[in-house]
Image: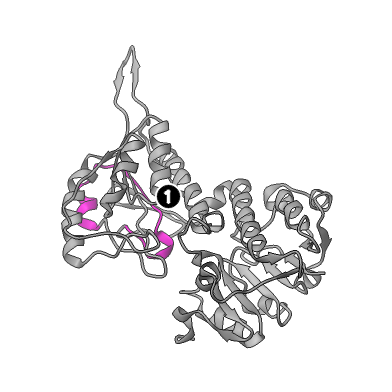
């Protein structure tokens, strides 16, 4: 009988978990599947061991969990913990492979297959497994909430006997999943919202949410086959910054979301732009953990730069741990069930499948993903 092991997270700062009673119920509903969870797994989301047991899970200690055929996690496993996995098992999680190449190498040396959930292709079929999108939608919402907590400006327009208060002006840079959610949230809170993206194709989406799209002539831009914005040239970045300087100077809140997966985030708001902004303006940098879009931003910290407040976002989805965990657990179930054969009672690997080709990094002791096979 195949077993799925779901241990507590190794990273003490990680508040999300890889299972909910609902996802366990679905997993155990697959013929032949048994789910083992580590005692205390549900503590971060206020779910008891008993609730998991009622859903069909077997509660046990860490060693027993890691003896499973499949291991589900969010944060990358530490080397010592990875050694608990049995040879031939499949480790599925957010491996951060571009920054944790030693983890991939260790998986190969231990004979542990490795699947990176962040590497899911941007296709219709893989949409229900797309961890980056599901977590980015929460991050976009959280960015606006954080900005409202830090800012001394009300979001909606208010007409009172004491006078009229104008709405906050919010500028969102990047209209991917996180950016669009930030736009929608800021609009619902009553702000006046402007947005920019290097991909002209998203203009219609921005305007459909009630925001004004900032047109900047950057010449030829576009998006990758996976729907991500292409990196800009230095000349294009310079042109973009010049246009943004005026917009940022008018804004009370700026939210930056520009990230290039596997690469350092581009610095969009430099010191020159920051110096043009109003004192007390708030910037939330969603790319802080990958280098930052804002000069001087630090992941997980709030800093001041010439009276401008810069929030370096870190694991914003973790602020809403119940919903973030539910979405991640759903992504995991969608992935596993897609390739699980009830007839053979096993996860079936197909090297020609576009999803597996994109996210399967290590198989049977070898690094098979072309992006990493030559670098580890």
Q: Residue furthest front?
A: 343
Q: Is residue 207 above or below residue 276?
A: above
Colour setup of the view: one colour
Count the marks: 1
Can residue 16 be seen here?
no
111 relative to 158 in the view: left or right:
right
> Which quadrant holds residue 211?
top left
Residue plotted at (63% across, 61% down): 338
Q: Is residue 173 above or below residue 211?
A: below
38 relative to 199 in the view: left or right:
right
Q: Is residue 357 above or below residue 236?
A: below
x and y percent of residue 304 in the render?
Answer: 34, 51
Q: Residues within 10 Å of mark 1 (few under 14, many from 20)?
A: many
x and y percent of residue 177 in the render?
Answer: 42, 50
Asked if the magenta segment contains residue 147, the reply would be no
Asked if the magenta segment contains residue 277, the reply would be yes
Residue plotted at (41% across, 38% down): 184
Residue plotted at (53% across, 74% down): 352
Residue plotted at (54% across, 84% down): 367
Q: Quadrant of the N terminus?
A: bottom right
191 relative to 241 in the view: left or right:
right
> Which quadrant holds residue 76?
bottom right
Pointer 1: what residue? 178
Q: Which residues are magenta?
A: 270-293
- Which of the pair 295/140 is nearer the observer? 140
x and y percent of residue 370 in the render?
Answer: 46, 81
Can residue 113 be seen here?
yes
For numbered disc 1, what is the local secondary structure?
helix
């Amino acid at each position: 009988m195949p077993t799925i092991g779901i241990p507590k997270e190794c990273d003490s700062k990680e508040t999300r978990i890889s299972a909910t009673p609902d996802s366990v119920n679905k997993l155990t509903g697959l013929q032949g599947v048994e789910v083992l969870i580590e005692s205390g797994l549900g503590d971060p989301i206020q779910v008891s061991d008993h609730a998991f047991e009622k859903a069909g899970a077997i509660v046990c200690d860490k060693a027993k969990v890691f003896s499973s055929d499949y291991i589900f996690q969010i944060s990358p496993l530490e080397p010592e913990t990875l050694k608990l996995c049995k040879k031939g098992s499949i480790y599925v999680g957010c491996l951060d492979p571009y920054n944790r190449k030693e983890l991939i190498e260790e998986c190969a040396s231990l004979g542990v297959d490795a699947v990176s959930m962040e590497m899911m292709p941007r296709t219709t079929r893989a949409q229900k497994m797309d961890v980056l999108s599901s977590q980015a939608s929460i991050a976009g919402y959280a960015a606006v909430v954080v900005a409202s907590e830090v800012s001394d400006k009300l979001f909606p327009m208010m007409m009172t006997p004491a006078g009229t208060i104008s709405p906050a002006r919010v500028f969102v840079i990047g209209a991917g999943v996180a950016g669009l959610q930030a736009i929608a949230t800021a609009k619902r809170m009553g702000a006046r919202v402007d947005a920019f993206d290097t991909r002209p194709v998203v203009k219609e989406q921005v305007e459909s949410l009630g925001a004004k799209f900032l047109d900047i002539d950057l010449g030829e831009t576009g998006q990758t086959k996976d729907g991500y914005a292409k990196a800009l040239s230095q000349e294009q970045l310079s042109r973009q910054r010049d246009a943004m300087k005026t917009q940022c100077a008018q804004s009370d809140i700026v939210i930056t979301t520009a990230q290039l997966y596997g690469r350092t985030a581009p610095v969009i708001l430099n010191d020159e732009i920051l110096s043009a902004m109003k004192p007390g303006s708030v910037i939330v940098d969603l790319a802080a953990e990958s280098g930052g879009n804002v000069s001087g931003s630090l992941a997980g910290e709030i800093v001041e730069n010439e009276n401008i407040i810069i929030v370096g976002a870190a694991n914003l989805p973790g602020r809403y741990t119940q919903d973030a965990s539910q979405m991640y657990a759903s992504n995991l179930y969608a992935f596993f069930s897609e390739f699980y054969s009830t007839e053979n009672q096993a996860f079936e690997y197909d090297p020609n499948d576009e999803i597996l080709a994109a996210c399967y990094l290590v198989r049977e002791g070898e690094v098979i993903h072309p992006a990493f096979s030559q670098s580890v």
